[in-house]
Amino acid sequence: MSQQQHTWRHRLAAGLEAWRFGFVLAVFLAVAGVLAWRLVGLHVVDQEFLRRQGDVRTIRVEAVDAHRGMITDRYGEPLAVSTPVQTIWANPSEMDPDDPRLANAARLLELNEAELRQRIREYASRRFIYVQRKMQPSVARQVMDLRIPGLYSRREYQRFYPAGEVTAHVVGFTNIDEHGQEGMELSYDDWLEGVPGAKRVLRDNRGRTISDLSLIRDASPGRDLELSIDLRLQYLAYRELKAVVTAHNAKGGTLVMLDVSTGEVLAMVNQQSYNPNDRSQLSPDRLRNKAITDLFEPGSPMKPIAMAAALESGQYSVSSTIDTSPGFRRFGRFTIRDSRNYGVIDMTTIIAKSSNVGISRIANDLGGDVIRDLYYRLGLGQATGIGFPGEAVGVLPAPPRWRPVEEATLSYGYGLSVNALQLAQAYMVLANGGVRYPLSLLKLDQSPAGDRVLSEHVTEQIRGMLQTVVEHGTGRRAQPVLYSAGGKTGTVHLVGQGGYEDSEYKAIFAGMAPIDNPRIVTVVAVDAPQAGEYYGGEVAAPVFARVMSDALRLLNVKPELELGEAVSEPAAAGERG
């Protein structure tokens, strides 16, 4: 090889090496430039955008649960409260269905292990499923201590009813999401329901909350609801009603107690009842507040009201007499009977002996419209305005032309239907001197404005007759200890699918005490007592006596009678009401 060729090759190799170096340097500088430009873009140009994107992936907005308002009795005793509990939820996409720790989790949660693992497999593509809702926080902590990936907990609230079945029909209950389903929980759902808040939280790449960042909106708890119910009287009424239903093997019963001067409901109980804290074996027939939703023919408790219509008309006075001989009346194929022939009796005796013949003769003389008008003024055939779900209005007939038999049966409580609350409202008017107050299940801060529907003079005369019923008539077993009382017994046939049931009755007593200045009106109704006695004077009247004796003492009403005066003999045979 010549010297010239060697020199050319050497120069070519040097040129290639310089070119390679330059190329590598250029590439390096280009990469460095791109990186520098990207860094400038990330830290200057796109900083705000990237920050927002990062927040979207790590910062979440969570709801802040708001607890439902509390329901209390008139003295602040809790009837429904929301307590904090824990809910276990899962992100199946993060979970291993074969994780051995799931066995312990299933045991703590009282779940079937195989079903739990199957759910995780079935919903593997989901990011949220409930595992166990609203459980004790202590148990939830044990589950979370297992540190199972994809298993989380959150705080919720659960409704609790301290009085259980005693107030169930009035208070009602909520569903698992704390939305009202029955009773006052349903009627005042919007009032009781809270407004959830919101907060920002920081979560890791598995969706677990690391920390709270800021509060967006504070939770607004629901408003409290103060009922007119006196829990002491509610317990008392429930105890006595349950005892009589059990003792007489009855199908059920109802008791309503009203404050005479305000129209407030002090107690309202039914049998059979249910426990709203444990609805695992709840049956629909137990849910009804029968004092408001169930209708019945009131029977003889309507006689004093028909008598009030007679006295108000001016055609009769307390001293008027009626010939009830021969102890029955026939209207075609229909016969009205008394338990015996009372002969000529005055107005008070008609009520005391519960004479169907006597009151029906008065009704035929007055006419059906006169009696119906007073029934309507006392609140029958119309809603009470109490605002309770499922309230039944009842039936108050208004034929274009009254037949004599319709006038007769109307006067002693057949051919119309009422609920127990309506009957109590009617007797409230008799008790307070003739004023009809709107009824209320909420505590009132002041007495409401009422409408006068009867004169004080007439109601005073009727109360005197009702006192005679308790002292000498069909309601002798309704006499409270140490207090005077007045009222009326009733025994009516229950209505079945085929009409009146021959062997099933409703035993009723409606009354008030103390009789000279009534404080409370109480209606007791017992459905289909089976154990021998079934008359209102034998079944319902003793419940009235026990409830009123204790209730008046609890309300600090001064006793009127000596102990010996308060003991009465049972009604004689044929005068059972």
Image (tube, grey):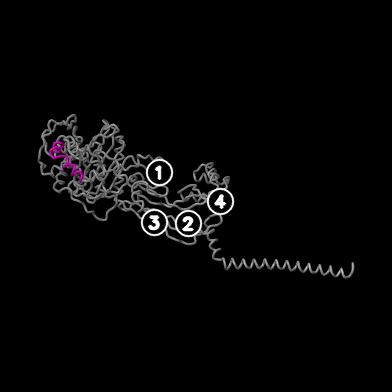
Name which residue type carries label 4: Pro
Q: Is residue 430 left or right of residue 103?
A: left
Residue 299 in which image quadrant? top left
Q: Secondary structure at mark 1?
A: loop
Name which residue type carries label 1: Asp
Instruction: Please report contact status of discs 2 and 3: CB closer than 8 Å, yes or no.
Output: no
The mark nearer the N terminus, 4 or 1, is 4
30 versus 97 height, above or below: below
Quote the CA–CA distance across marks 4 and 2. 20 Å
Q: Quadrant of the C terminus?
A: top left
- Res. 149 mark: 4
- Magenta span: predominant SS is helix
372 magenta-colored: yes
Name which residue type carries label 2: Glu
Quote the CA–CA distance across marks 3 and 4. 33 Å
Q: Position of residue 138 (x, y in %)?
A: 48, 50
The mark nearer the N terminus, 2 or 3, is 2
- Magenta-tinted stretch: 359-376
Q: Nearer the viewer, mark 4 or mark 1?
A: 4
- Res. 62 mark: 2
Instruction: Please report contact status of discs 3 and 4: CB closer than 8 Å, yes or no.
Output: no
Instruction: Please report contact status of discs 1 and 2: CB closer than 8 Å, yes or no.
Output: no
62 magenta-colored: no
The residue that mark 1 highlights is 278
The residue that mark 3 highlights is 221
The mark nearer the N terminus, 1 or 3, is 3
The mark nearer the N terminus, 1 or 2, is 2
Quote the CA–CA distance across marks 2 and 3. 17 Å
Q: Secondary structure at mark 2?
A: strand
Q: Confirm whether residue 174 shows in the render.
A: yes
Badge 1: residue crowd in 10 Å (few <14, some 14–19, many ≥20): few
